[in-house]
Amino acid sequence: MTTSNAYSMVAHSAYSADGRRLAVSLSGNLLGEPVFYLHGTPGSRIGPRPKERVLRELGVSLISFDRPGYGRSDRLQSRTVADVAEDVAAIADSLGLERFAVLGRSGGGPHALACAALLPDRVTRTAALVSLAPWRATGLNWFGGMADSNRDAYTTASKNPEALSMRLVEAAAKIKADPASHLDILNPEMPEADRRVVEDAGVRVLLAQNFAEGLRYSAEGWIDDVLAFCSPWGFEVSDIRVPVYLWHGGRDVFSPVTHTEWLAERITHKQVDIEPDRAHFGALEAVPKVLSWLLDRPLRPQSDPAVEAPDKKPVLVS
């Protein structure tokens, strides 16, 4: 393992059963309770996280990794949402972990639910923040309330995957040239609640670094995420038996709140937290209280921002 001072992270490599490299970062109390933190779409292992103080207060060892095709993790072509469970299990094995909690934000939400469904003997609790529901979910208007950009991307993915790939390759090249540009592109569709979060300079830097690292070598992870969301997930949400925390902002236009409401109706053991005046990026600020629930440990009220601020000269984990 190697350490990067910029994020107080420890870098680690694990390998899947079929020999793929998985790039991993650990932060917080490295001897604490393990929690896998699954990043959004697009994203990476260095995405925004709670302050080190919060992680240490809760005694959390936060484990994040690049999903296949992102950052420094090898691609797994034609992967499904369900495939993440084997990768999480492989990382846990490499770290000597038998039991752990899982938290997924945005595009990480469906993957966190996959771990809950497919690793019931290893996952203690799971949280899915601003998650999508399964593609073609019965009784759900999947596109209802969704921003045009996401509606168009998912429609294209379901009808013409090659066109989606070309579009995301072009978008990734622009993000690589100017990582902050992705937020500027999304800004016109953002509700005010999201603009308030991403206008914070520290959050913008963290998100820009997150996008740049995830798309460091290619758009493959981004492409494969979108295709996986628009295909059968490989498990049934109703099969989940471990406790699940579902969080959503009522003003979310990137993954509308109706998706979490649909999930809540089908998951037996759940806690549902819908904040009507929050939106998609409000999930970043909700992570500390969700971690508290995952470990069943109280967190003292915080007066400063919940998200870790970068150093003056941020450095990507290498």
Image (cartoon, grey):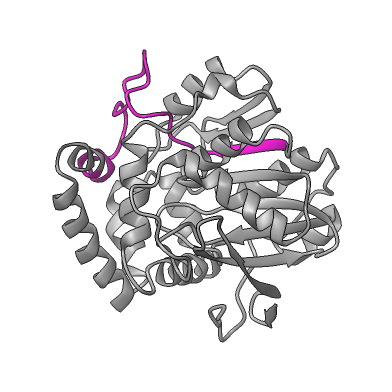
Image quadrant in which the C terminus is located: bottom right
Q: Main secondary structure of the magenta part?
A: loop
As drawn, the residue found furthest toward the bottom would be 313
Q: Is residue 225 above or below residue 185?
A: above
Would residue 162 be found to the left or right of residue 265 on screen? left
Corner quadrant of residue 140: top left
Where residue 293 sits in the image (x, y, percent)? 76, 38
Q: Write the start and end of the magenta stretch as one range.
A: 124-153
Report the residue at 18% width, 42% height from top. 156
Q: Is residue 217 visible?
A: yes
Report the residue at 14% width, 51% height from top. 163
Between 143 and 113, the residue placed more toward the observer is 113
Where residue 182 sits in the image (x, y, percent)? 33, 63
Q: Is residue 308 above or below residue 276?
A: below
Between 191 and 223, the residue placed more toward the observer is 223
Per the image, is 55 magenta? no
As drawn, the residue found furthest toward the front would be 18
Between 186 and 167, the residue placed more toward the observer is 167
Would residue 74 be found to the left or right of residue 23 on screen? left
Q: Is residue 187 visible?
A: no
Image quadrant in which the N terminus is located: bottom right
Q: Is residue 281 above or below residue 109?
A: below
Where residue 31 sits in the image (x, y, percent)? 85, 62
Q: Is residue 149 above or below residue 43?
A: above
Where residue 108 sits in the image (x, y, percent)? 51, 46
Would residue 179 be found to the left or right of residue 278 on screen? left
Corner quadrant of residue 297: top right
Corner quadrant of residue 227: top left
Report the residue at 25% width, 71% height from top. 174
